[in-house]
Amino acid sequence: MKKSLLAPALLTSLLISGNAVSAVITQIAAPGALTLSNNFETSKNNADVTFNSTAVIMTAAQATSNVTPSGDKGLVDSVGNAPLVGTLSSATTSVGLWFGNDDFNLDFNAVLEIFDGATLLGSVSVLSNANDYADQFIGLSSDVAFDSFHIYYQRPNAAGLSVYIDDLYLASTSVPEPATLTLLGLGLAGIGFSRKKKTA
Ligand SMILES: [Ca+2]
Ligand SMILES: [Ca+2]
Ligand SMILES: [Ca+2]
């Protein structure tokens, strides 16, 4: 009896591991070549990323002893709603951000995970420097494109600290350039066509 009960469980675990997508993840230690997407000074969401409904903009004075990489605000999600989830309008290969609100001298990791749909592709972590300031960067690039990312603080180590992020960066993309060139080419072709019509 015991053997017949074990077999389906083993088969299920084999099937789950067989479905896992293995992405090559490279940790990024600074914004570097990434492009700034949102500094959270005016809006929580933008054309690139929509965050979960419970995330709110908060002043750095309230959260991070007024130290944040841009302006005087960042994005916060309270501990009960962790992780903070960003959903991308189009899949990308890199993401990075600054995190803080790491006060009370607690010893914990910030963790950044990327997903393709419901599939976890990989993650990186950074040990908090426990100074409250949003002064540490966490980022990664992946060889497999992802359409959402999660950031959370390791529990129970981080106790009741809310996740605070500022200055979201995404992969620099050259996609608009060929599109612009194509439109420009069509426009020039159109001008040539209309000129030909007039002279005929
Ligand atoms: Ca800011
Ligand atoms: Ca704080
Ligand atoms: Ca810090």
Image (cartoon, helix red, strand yellow):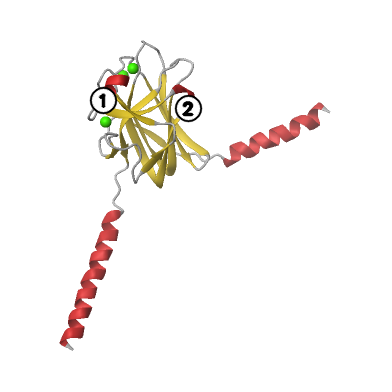
On screen, residue 73 above or below 44: above
Quadrant of the rendered image containing residue 169: top left
Image spot of residue 195 (x, y percent): 17, 80
What label does residue 3 carry, if any? none
Q: How packed is label 2: few (under 14 Cα within 10 Å), some, or many (20 or more)? A: some
Q: Earlier in the sequence, mark 1 or mark 2?
A: 1
On screen, residue 66 above or below 7: above
Quadrant of the rendered image containing residue 107: top left
**What's the residue at 49%, 39% (across, down)?**
22
Q: Secondary structure at mark 1?
A: loop
Q: Residue at the far left: name it.
A: 199
Q: Residue at the far top: name it.
A: 105
Q: Secondary structure at mark 2?
A: helix
Q: How packed is label 1: few (under 14 Cα within 10 Å), some, or many (20 or more)? A: many
On the image, numbered disc 1 is attached to which residue?
68
Judged left or right of residue 186, residue 128 is right
**What's the residue at 55%, 39% (across, down)?**
20
**What's the residue at 23%, 65% (across, down)?**
184
Where does the N terminus fall, quadrant-wise?
Answer: top right
**Ligand 2's quadrant:** top left
Q: Amino acid at mark 1?
A: Thr
What label does residue 81 carry, if any? 2
Judged left or right of residue 33, residue 195 is left
The alpha-carbon separation of the residues under discs 1 and 2 comes to: 22 Å
Ligand 1 has an atom within 8 Å of the beta carbon of the residue at disc 1: yes
